[in-house]
Image (cartoon, grey):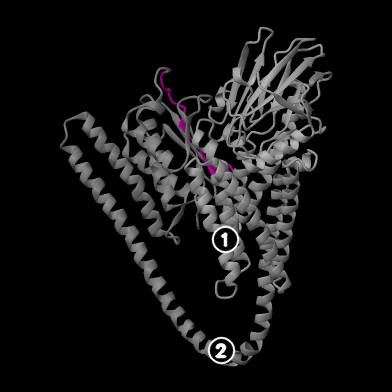
């Protein structure tokens, strides 16, 4: 508070008590700091009726931006505006989203007030304009003059870029600002992901602390600019009011831990530096809990003080390590130097010592972007430094290794003999396993045939046609699997088979099973050079068995000649296409087999999903036809 009073007295020493009127002559953004009167902050009032009768001091310093310092009470500002433009869409903007509370009062000709209230205590959706910058309609007609009052509360430095402009000019300015903040976020995200990926490979704690620092530094700057309020938590007023403090404390603690890890600051070697940095970690933990307890005035005061001291400390520490010959410290010291230069520019603007400009206004953001880039380079440079040290160490060990080579050669010869002997044993075991696997396929085929025979015997004792049909279908399905195991048993490959040969055998088996004239039914099978492994061949065979069985049962009238087509081809490197169907009587329009609840249709759908495929009807051809796409299996011949 004493700092604020000192700034206020300096302000009063260059002031006149005559009220100035700002005349709007063009649509551009114009800062009106030297047209604004300040109410005596020592007189604490919260009511506009009391404030309007008090004295306001107007500065003649010709500074367009107000720099009032922090305050733990409300500030009252007064200004008058005359509109000489043809349009009346004038707006007042305050490009300081970190203000906790701002309320604009407009006094009409009768001396009564209308007001609009904004701030971090209200949800973002309550704002008329969808932007973190505070924007108010002035509602001032051509040629009219009005007096306005601003009631402001901020726990941070009250640097107030208050401007008057048309909506169009303000929109252009805000668009440029959004692009700049987006560029900042893009740099931070790229650096975060880049260093996170490196951390996953090298598992270096320096990278862990650095990416934490990056993440919370980004959240801090976006919170200061109000973008987290708009995009991340527009309804979470706790994070809106405390986010800057909490994120800044976590970012600074992570930055200190990064410096300790990166510069290898150990208690036993650098005790004073070690205790200095860990003392600041404790101070930032204290500041963190002050923010949690909503003691914002002291939290921001401590945050600014401790951040300044630890930043200067880290700068001197980095130059000390560079002086001591620790090469990775060069980019580290350069990063902190750049950041502090821009922070100093921002602080000088914040206290009114230098003029408001793009670089000074966004100094912390620009400095942060440059800093994180140099710190990333510093991490990469440290890896190169370690690599060079490793090369030197390797050269020192080459002589020792050369002496040991002769001994190792003898050991290698002995080991090679042992490996060759083991290889012969393994080869013999593989032959035994191949014979065993063939026997397994043979036994599986025999067991499946036994199951088929048992189903056939049971089927003969059934009188229920529906149950007989179920048992018969089960026999066909089991038989389709048995054929695969028989082919694998007889082939040279024990894990894959030529699918066209399998399809031919499967169709012959189905024809022999059904009571149809083989002369009337023609099969067209095409699957050239298609090799399937066991896991794909079985479910695909069950699908084909189910569709062909339905065709043999229902597609053709008695003694009607017909054709069943099965074509399989490779669509690309990863996928197969199976076309299967008949030229029979087809199905009725009101029946969709893809949605049927029958066991066969369910089985087709489930197996298609198992093959990561898609099933569809092909209505362009005569009869009933299906197209099935599925993932290409890994096969070996």
Q: Nearer the viewer, mark 2 or mark 1?
A: 1
Q: Quadrant of the N terminus?
A: top right
Which residue is tagged 2? 408
Q: Residue 493 or 172: which is nearer the viewer?
A: 172
Q: Residue at the location (43% across, 39% down)? A: 608
Q: Is residue 170 above or below residue 250?
A: above
Q: Position of residue 66 (x, y in %)?
A: 73, 33
| Horizontal arrangement in the rendering, residue 408 relative to residue 560 (left or right) | right
- Label 1 environment density (alpha carbons within 10 Å; few <14, some 14–19, many ≥20): many
Q: Is residue 385 above or below residue 376?
A: below
The image quarter containing residue 324 is bottom right
| Horizontal arrangement in the rendering, residue 522 relative to residue 313 (left or right) | left
The secondary element bearing badge 2 is classed as helix
Q: Position of residue 330 (x, y in %)?
A: 73, 65
Which residue is tagged 1? 257
Q: Residue at the location (31% across, 45% down)? A: 478
């Amino acid at each position: 508070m004493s700092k604020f009073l000192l700034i206020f007295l300096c302000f009063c020493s260059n002031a006149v008590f005559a009220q100035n009127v700002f005349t709007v002559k063009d649509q551009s953004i114009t800062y009106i700091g030297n047209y604004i009167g300040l109410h005596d902050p020592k007189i604490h009032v919260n009511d506009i009726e009391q404030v309007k009768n008090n004295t306001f001091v107007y500065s003649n310093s010709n500074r367009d931006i107000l720099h009032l310092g922090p305050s733990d009470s409300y500030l009252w500002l007064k200004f008058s505006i005359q509109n000489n433009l043809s349009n009346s869409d004038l707006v007042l903007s305050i490009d300081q989203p970190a203000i906790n509370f701002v309320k604009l009062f407009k006094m009409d000709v009768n001396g009564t007030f209308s007001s609009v209230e904004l701030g971090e205590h209200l949800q973002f959706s309550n704002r008329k304009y969808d932007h973190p910058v505070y924007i108010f309609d002035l509602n001032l007609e051509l040629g009219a003059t009005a007096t306005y009052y601003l009631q402001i509360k901020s726990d941070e430095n009250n640097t107030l870029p208050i401007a008057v402009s048309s909506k169009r000019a303000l929109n252009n300015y805000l668009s440029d600002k959004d692009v700049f903040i987006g560029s900042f976020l893009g740099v931070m995200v790229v650096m975060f992901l880049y260093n996170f990926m490196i951390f996953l490979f090298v598992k270096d704690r320096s990278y862990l602390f650095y990416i934490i620092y990056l993440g919370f530094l980004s959240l801090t700057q976006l919170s200061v600019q109000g973008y987290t309020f708009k995009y991340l938590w527009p309804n979470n007023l706790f994070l809106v009011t405390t986010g800057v403090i909490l994120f800044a404390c976590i970012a600074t603690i992570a930055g200190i831990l990064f410096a300790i890890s990166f510069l290898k600051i150990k208690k036993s070697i650098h005790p004073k530096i070690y205790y200095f940095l860990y003392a600041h970690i404790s101070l930032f933990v204290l500041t963190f809990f002050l923010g949690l307890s909503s003691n914002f005035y002291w939290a921001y005061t401590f945050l600014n003080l401790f951040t300044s001291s630890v930043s200067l400390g880290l700068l001197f520490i980095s130059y000390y390590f560079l002086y001591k010959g620790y090469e990775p410290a060069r980019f580290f010291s350069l990063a902190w130097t750049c950041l502090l230069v821009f922070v100093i520019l921002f602080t000088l603007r914040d206290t009114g010592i230098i003029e408001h400009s793009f670089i000074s206004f966004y100094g912390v953001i620009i400095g942060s972007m440059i800093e994180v880039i140099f710190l990333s380079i510093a991490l990469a440079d440290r890896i190169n430094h370690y690599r060079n040290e490793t090369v030197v160490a390797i050269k020192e060990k080459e002589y020792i290794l050369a002496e040991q080579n002769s001994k190792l050669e003898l050991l290698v010869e002995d080991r090679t003999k042992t490996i060759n002997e083991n290889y012969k044993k393994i080869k013999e075991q593989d032959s035994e396993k191949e014979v065993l696997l063939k026997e397994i396929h043979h036994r599986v085929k025999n067991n499946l045939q036994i199951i088929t025979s048992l189903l056939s015997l049971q089927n003969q004792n059934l009188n229920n046609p529906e149950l007989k049909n179920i048992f018969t279908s089960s026999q066909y399905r089991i038989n389709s699997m048995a054929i695969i195991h028989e082919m694998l048993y007889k082939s040279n490959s024990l894990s894959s088979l030529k699918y066209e040969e399998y399809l031919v055998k499967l169709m012959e088996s189905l024809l022999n099973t059904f009571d149809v004239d083989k002369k009337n039914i023609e099969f067209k099978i095409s699957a050239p050079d298609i090799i399937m492994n066991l896991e794909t061949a079985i479910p695909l065979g069950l699908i084909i068995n189910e569709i062909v069985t339905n065709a043999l049962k229902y597609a053709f009238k008695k003694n009607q000649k017909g054709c069943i087509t099965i074509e399989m081809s490779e669509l690309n490197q990863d996928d197969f296409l199976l076309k299967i169907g008949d030229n029979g009587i087809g199905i009725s329009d009101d029946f969709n087999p893809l949605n049927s609840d029958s066991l066969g249709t369910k089985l087709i759908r489930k197996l298609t999903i198992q093959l990561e495929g898609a099933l569809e009807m092909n209505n362009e051809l005569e009869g009933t036809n299906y197209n099935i796409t599925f993932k290409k299996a890994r096969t070996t011949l």
